[in-house]
Structure formats: structure tokens, C-alpha cells
Amino acid sequence: MGKTIFRVLSDGEIEALHERTLEVFETVGIRITHEEALTKLARAGARVDANSGVVRFPAPLVHELLSLAPSVAVYSGLNGQRLQVGGENRYYLSLILDPFIVDYEHGLRRPVLEDVRRHTILGESLSRVNAMMRMQYPVSDVPEPDSYLKTMEVFLCHCTKHVSAYPSSEENCREWMDAMAVIAEAAGLDVASEPLLSVAMAVTSPLTVHGPNIAIMKMALERSYPIIPTVCPMAGTTAPYSLAGTMLTANVESLLPVLLAQVFKPGHPALYAVGPSVTDMRTGHDLYYRAEKALFKLAGIQMGRFYRLPVAGEAAGTLTWRPDVQNGAEGMLYLLASLAAGQNLIGGLGSLHNANGMSAEQIVLQCGLADLGEYVVRGIALDDLQAAVESLRRVGPGGNFLTDPLTLERLRSNEFFHSPYLDLSGGYVDSAPSMVEIAHHTVERLIAEYRPTVPEKVCEALQRFFHDKYRDPAVRSLSARRPS
């Protein structure tokens, strides 16, 4: 069966980008502000300038460390599902929180605690969603610093799927580690070996890794938690102002967490992920979801697969916050690039507003786009052409196929496209809802039908854990289960 495959780099261009990557590692180097890492890298064979903290990696060392990195990362959840991230497997993650929320009734606003509950329930209820991403942002109706902890409590009390955490500090990462230990103990799981969490490690463009981010990586290494690079070079400000230069920077920086993880703990899973963007040179604004995103995505996936690493990246975002044509066009472009190039982990369902916002309806809308994209990249199976010949022979010229055995056989199969999230009426139904209306109705229905999935003993253990951490007594009384 032929598949739909997108490529933006030839084999020769992949090799050329790899060679230039090795050149940057060996001659430009990486600035690292972590003494233990510098010591370990020097022992491994890197050239370390103790005064500047710049580390240069000889090409043989890069190859050696890459050879230690596994090609599959295992993700697990309280629901018992184990995701084999790598190879030809593909999984989706939905967002929970962003700096802005697009409210179906009122438009753009700041997030509140109830958004966390609703978005988590939605991710828990949608079969397309395999895991959930938790960014660190406060909500407007719970004072800081309690806001960060309360959103974590509400999220974990509604989520049994795998969790990808994006810690904002060492302290925040330790809170994640402690919370996962509470969950594992209450659920009777081994916290050291069960990969309930994956942890994002940031690289600062250009070519810098700060000590706190290595400390975050080390916490993940203490357990079996896979590492996800957060690599976001911006063309013109934190990366060279060319497509090739930005992609080169992103490739070097995405390999850094992989290499560092192998220096500290050989064989630990680390993913390949790039998220370049473009600086608007008229305003200085960072524009994350421009057309260049599709090219960066395609090139990044090809490079990740070249290195035989699990490949992660964003899903179907958009520059706009409105549910308009631009939203759908940009989202479908980026998602189709992810699917047709072979991305393993597609994160951020729900993203919009230049990666600064999200909405519940957008999660569902992008599930519909995912259904469409998955169908298209599947291709056409031509292994049953003889059955088609027999069908034509039975019906003959001028007949119809409504009751032909092949029709009856395939009628309820996945031969032809279907998705509950798109208007497929073709204009024959005057009252057919729009895709946005379908998304809104789906959101409200799933939240209304939701019944708790996290075991009560796990939720009670989490509530005890968080209770004494809150500074404001009023926050302690907010229920994690019920709407606030």
C-alpha cells in the first residue's frame, strides 16, 4: 500500500546538514553553565574551555553518544496504556493551559482554574488524544504562587493518560517529581521505572544550555522519564536570518539534550524536536506559525529519523485566534507535514494565537483535521484490484453498485473517510452545524458525560500532598474534582 510522503530535503542535503552540524559542534561549540556537566564532558572527550564554559564536541564523540540513544521512548499512564514513541508509531497530545484562552462565547481572555478542569476532561475523553501537555502558567482566579500548584492538582486529579511536563524552574520540576511519586505510591506503581512523566529540557538559542535546565534533565534521569528538547531558535534574532541557518541551529540544539543525557546516563531515552520561528524584522515580534513552520517541520522530522531518534513536535497551530479560514489552512498545512513526514509525537492539540493561546473547541477542531490528515497519508491500497474487477463484471455496463457484495462488505469499514468532527453533509442538510458548532457541542457533551477516571485513592493522596503547600487558606478549600 502506497503512503503519502512529504520530503523537503534530498539524501544529499540531509548529509550536508549533518556535516555542518558536526562542524558547529566541533568548531563553534556550545556554552554550558553547569560544572558537573563540564567535568563529565571533558572526561568523555569533549574540549572544554573552563573560563568561558564553551564545549566543543569532536565528531567521533557526537557519533558515539548518538549511538547510545534509544530509537524508542516508552510513555505510560495511570490508564495502563504504554506508548512506544518511535519507529512508525504516532501519538497525539492535547494542551491544558496557555497564557490566553479563546472562550466560545466571549472571545480572548486570561485562563481560569475551570479551564484546567475542562481541558483535562476533554483530553481524557477524546480517543484521538494519547497524552497531555502541561505548560506552567498561572490562572487569573487563584493568586500566585498557589496558582501553579492548584492547576497541577486539578490537572492530575482528572488525568490518567501520560503527562508531558514543561517545568519553569528546578523547584517546579521537583514539584512534578514529588507529585508523580505520590501518584505512583497510591497506584501501587514503581516510581523509578514507570515512565508516567516526560520532561521538557530547554536549550537557549543560540547554542546555550543553562545550569538549571541540566538540573531539570538530571531529575528526569533519576527515573525513567524521557527527555523532550525545547528548541525554539528565532530567525533573525536568536538564529541566522536564513532558512538554512535557522534549521542548522535547530538541528544542533535539538541534539544537545540527547548528547547530554547519554553523557550522564547512557541509554536514557531522549527525543528529537525542533520548533523554529521567524522574527518579524519590522516589529521584532516572534511569529511562530508562519508558512516557514511547515518547511522547518519537514526538515526536522527528516533529520530526527536520520538520527534514528523518536521525533516530537507541535501539531496544527495558527497565528490567528479566530476559528477562520486562516486557522484551518495553517493548521492543516502543519499537521499534514507532521503526518506525511513521519513525526512520532504530535503535541499541542488546541494551539492557536501564535502559540500563546488555546481553546477547548480548537482541540476538537484539530482532532477533525487529524482524522482528515491520517486518512490522506494512509494512501490507496491496490492489493484488491481483482475484487474490483469482479465487482465490475457482476454489475456490468450501465448498472449500479448499491447492493453489490463489495459495497456491502466495505459499507461500514474505514475504506472511505469519516469523522464526527467535520460537516460531511455536502450541503444536502440545511440545518447541518458548522465545524466550529460541532466542536462546541462535542466539548459540552463530553464534559457533561464525564465521570471520574482517576482512582479516588490517588486523588485523595494528591489532595493531601498539595494541601499544606498552599499559602492562602482559601485555596485549600477549592475542590479539585468539582467546578471552582
Image (tube, rainbow, N blue to C red):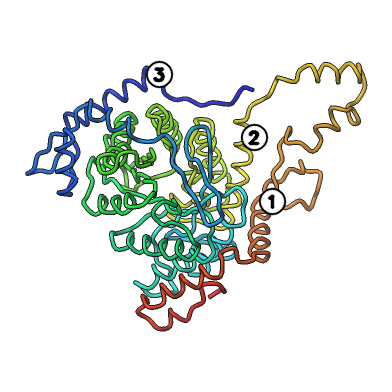
Residue 183: x %, y % from top left: 46, 63
Q: Quadrant of the N terminus?
A: top right
Q: Which of 430 and 271 is in front in this view?
A: 271
Q: Distance between the residues labelled 3 and 1?
A: 43 Å
* For residue 211, side relative to residue 379 (left or right): left
Categorize mark 1 by other alpha carbons within 10 Å: few (<14), some (14-19), many (20+).
few
Q: Residue at x 49, y 46 (%)?
A: 317
Q: Give residue 375's mark.
A: 2
Q: Nearer the viewer, residue 395 or 104?
A: 395
Q: What element carries label 2?
A: helix
Q: Quadrant of residue 370?
A: top right
User: Camera-side residue: 435 or 476?
Assistant: 476
Q: Where is residue 86 in the image (x, y as percent from the top left)?
A: 47, 36
Q: Earlier in the sequence, mark 2 or mark 3?
A: 3
Q: Residue 422 carries which label?
A: none
Residue 362, image x, y percentages: 56, 53
Task: State the image coordinates of residue 161 (x, y, percent, origin top left).
Answer: 53, 55
| Residue tagged 3 | 11
Name the quadrant containing residue 310: top left
Rendered view: 157 above or below 76: below
Circle on res. 434: 1
Q: In which quarter of the image is residue 147?
A: bottom left
Distance of mark 2 from mark 3, alpha carbons?
Answer: 27 Å
Where disc 3 sits, the SS reads: helix
- Whichever of labels 2 and 1 marks the residue nearer the N terminus, that label is 2
**Nearer to me, 186 or 415:** 186
Query: Which of the two discs, 3 and 1, labels the residue nearer the N terminus?
Result: 3
Which residue is at the far bottom? 473
